[in-house]
Image: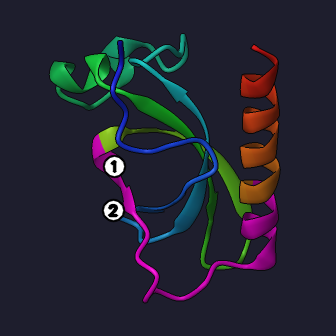
Amino acid sequence: MMKSQFNIGQHVQHRMLGYPGVVIDVDAEYTLTQPTLDELDVHESFLTKPWYHVILQDENGKHIHTYLAESQISERSSSEDEPDEGLNDISRSIYKQYNDLKARI
């Protein structure tokens, strides 16, 4: 069973860019067909660890859907600037959908 560091609906931060974000899905390993593994500039060991679909908020407030390796994100501390209400809404919505789905299983 996969052990992921971050959960669906959790607020995170892009390590390099500093952008706040929300996890919307988790894959046990890299699963995209594009870009291909040969096109990625990551060490092969990262491909077999969790990858996350994340909605990031850039410096202009624009929301961007991206796919990130676990090593590219960190937990957002409560002392950091709050993201806009849009990210909070996304987090609440994703978390509710996820819990509703779990309750039906």
Look at label 1 and name its amino acid. Answer: Gln
Residue 9, position as x, y percentages in the image: 64, 50
Colouring chosen for the image of the structure: rainbow
Q: Residue at image x 42%, y 18%?
A: 28
The disc at residue 64 is: none
Q: Which residue is mark 2?
A: 15
Residue type highlighted by circle 2: Arg
Q: Which residues are magenta?
A: 71-90
Residue placed most toward the observer, 70 or 35: 70
Q: Is residue 57 left or right of residue 80?
A: right
- The quarter of the rendered structure image containing the N terminus is top left
The residue lying toward the viewer, choosing from 32 and 100, is: 100
**SS category of the residue bearing label 2:** loop
The x and y percentages for residue 86 are 81, 69
Q: How many marks?
A: 2
Left or right relative to 63: residue 83: left
On the image, numbered disc 1 is attached to which residue? 72
Q: Residue at x 29, y 20 (%)?
A: 47
Cα–Cα gap, marks 2 and 1: 5 Å
Residue 33: which quarter of the image? top right
- Classify 49 as above or below 59: above
Residue 82, magenta (yes or no): yes
For residue 2, above or below residue 58: above
- Where does the image place residue 102, in percent across and percent down from the top left? 72, 25
How crowded is the residue under tag 1: few (<14 C-alpha within 10 Å), some, or many (20+)?
A: some
Q: Is residue 9 magenta?
A: no
